[in-house]
Amino acid sequence: MYAVVGCGECRAFWVVESEPETTGCPRCGKRHQYERLKRFLETNDADEARQARAALLANREGYSDAFGELDSFAEMDERVADSGIEEATYLEASGLDAEAVAAAGERAEGGTENSSSRKGIITEALETLDRPTEAEIREYATDRGVPAADAHGLLEKLRRRGAVSVTDGRYRLL
């Protein structure tokens, strides 16, 4: 539920979602008990609440006629969403490869998942190769998209944790 409420100190209006115990005025910062606030409108629709707040502000400032000529917030949101150029078009016009940018975004959003898959590739190298050297593990990992520096760092972390042992420059999984 959304409510349009007003501050008794500075006369600001704002929209409050749900029914919190207290809420703060966005203009003056005064904390108010929600139950004691005057609610100008209560609705289940956020756009309707925004529209009511805007109407209250327009009426107070003497712009109710001009406000009546405007589209609703929902209609304006739709127009804004439909305006402008497509992201891919913008990227291409900027000299960037849209597919490469999308792939980079997917990798970045993967975060820890991407890190664990890199660790998985190092572990896979240790399981697949017979007592490999660091160079062989790095080569295996770089062939599967893990940068050489990351492969070295991950291998070193595994060694420090005791998951990998090194004897005469040869690695094995414990």
Image (spheres, helix red, strand yellow):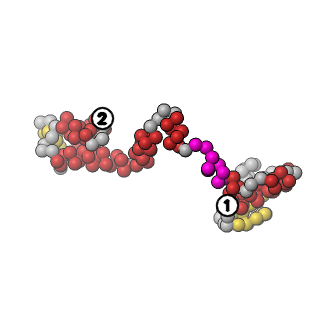
Q: Check the picture and name the quadrant holding the N terminus.
A: bottom right
Indicate whether 154 appears above or below 16. Answer: above
Looking at numbered disc 2 in the image, what kind of residue is underneath it?
Ala
Q: Is 84 colored magenta in this rendering?
A: yes
Residue 143: give its label: none
Nearer to us of marks 1 and 2 is 1
- The Cα–Cα distance between marks 1 and 2, rounded to whole angstroms, is 50 Å
Indicate whether 90 appears above or below 51. Answer: above
Which stretch is magenta? 77-85
Q: Which residue is mark 1?
A: 46
The residue shown at (22%, 37%) is: 139
Q: Is residue 112 left or right of residue 168?
A: right
Q: Is residue 27 left or right of residue 117?
A: right
Residue in front for this viewpoint, 125 or 30: 125
Residue in front for this viewpoint, 151 or 161: 151
Residue 149: give its label: 2
> For mark 1, does the 10 Å Cα neighbourhood hold few (<14), some (14 to 19), or many (20 or more) residues?
some
Q: Is residue 157 left or right of residue 24?
A: left
Task: Give whichever of discs 1 and 2 has the lower sequence position.
Answer: 1
Viewer can see residue 162: no
Indicate whether 154 appears above or below 75. Answer: above
